[in-house]
Amino acid sequence: MSSRRFHRKSRSGCLHCKKRHIKCDEGRPICANCQRASVVCTYDQLKVPTSPAHSSSLSPGSSASTLVYEHPSTFDMLDLSLMHHYTIETSLELFAGQGSREIWQEMVPHQAQSNPLLMHGILALASMDLARTRPNERQVFATRALAHQNAGTRLFRSMLEQSRSSDSHHVLMIFSMMLAILAFAFPHACDTPPDFDGILDLFSLMRGCKTVWFLNPESLAGTPLAQWIKATFAGHPIKMKPEVDHRFQVLRARLKDPADILATDQLLEFIHKELATSSDGVSNIGRWPTMVSDAFWLRVQNHEVDSLLVLSHYSVVLGAPNFRWWTTNWDSILLRAINSALSEHDKKLIEWDYPAMMKFADSYKDN
């Protein structure tokens, strides 16, 4: 009689592995599966791993104290260095335009001194920036960035559930903007670009922030943050180019699912009314993924071919001038991932033309 090996099922793996029903090695703060796929690794709780396997997996010159925390609100000497880098460099490169320096270099760091949520956001942004600019130390900085992002995200969710006061809304709004920047910045801090599902995880992170933006808008009225948002996200509308309009007409004519049609209409409306440029480029470039319905997003997550085709047309927004390092090349990042996710059968079905889509994404580069 053959013997059968039994093993205890782990219930403490990361959310990404649980979602895909794959075995997680529970490496903290980022497991091996998420590291290979270049996706955000999130745990229900952040704990210091004690297993020898994890200790031996640290990069040369790093230590457990460099990569993880005993408590989400504990900061160390590396974090002090990150705070310095954020103040003198990262904060100046997040947004351009009137008042950006006062908001991101002065107001946000000042409030972060007494607010762990904003502090985690600042340190995640600085570490993501350094992972991009220091390739020899990329693993250390990218891992620390994800640790701060994960810790901040847990605090963010807790504050959303427990408080809806005007004071917390101001802080939640700032951190939600940090999460959107981190989502776009993530591929620039990795050795290899994320796959299609990894990109969806990043967009899902942004979609989770839309609750904050509609939570209590009255509480922001008249504040420096509200004035900065109004000034920064304003610009001159871009006229719809005939070739872009024609491609959208062709797309809409082939769609049958109501969720796909609505998402296409929302994208067209965004281009007509909100895709506006200033001397600093497009600032609201990540808004459309937060606008689409849950039904459409579920279809995208299920790799429905028509929904992926709709998503590919978002590249024309991502390819518009933006002049921020964290949004650079996102049109090609998205199209490359979709091209890899589509099967040869699906490509023939929708007459997928990858070079033509890349050219389409560049439609407004010269504006």
Image (spheres, rainbow, N blue to C red):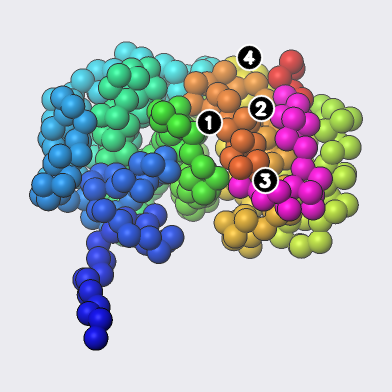
Q: CA distance from mark 2 to mark 3?
A: 13 Å
To which residue does mark 1 refer?
Answer: 229
Residue 359 percent across, percent down from the top left: 76, 26
Q: Give the number of the mark in front: 4 or 3.
A: 3
Mark 2 packing: few (<14 Cα in 10 Å), some, or many (20+)?
many
Q: Is 79 situated above or below 167?
A: above
Whether residue 336 is visible here, answered yes or no, is: yes
Q: CA distance from mark 1 to mark 3?
A: 26 Å
Quarter occupied by the N terminus: bottom left
Residue 201 percent across, percent down from the top left: 48, 48
Q: Is mark 4 in CB contact (under 8 Å) with mark 2?
A: no
Residue 174 percent across, percent down from the top left: 41, 37
Q: Is 141 situated above or below 101?
A: below
- Amino acid at circle 4: Ser
Q: Is mark 2 in CB contact (under 8 Å) with mark 3?
A: no
Q: Which mark is residue 279?
A: 4
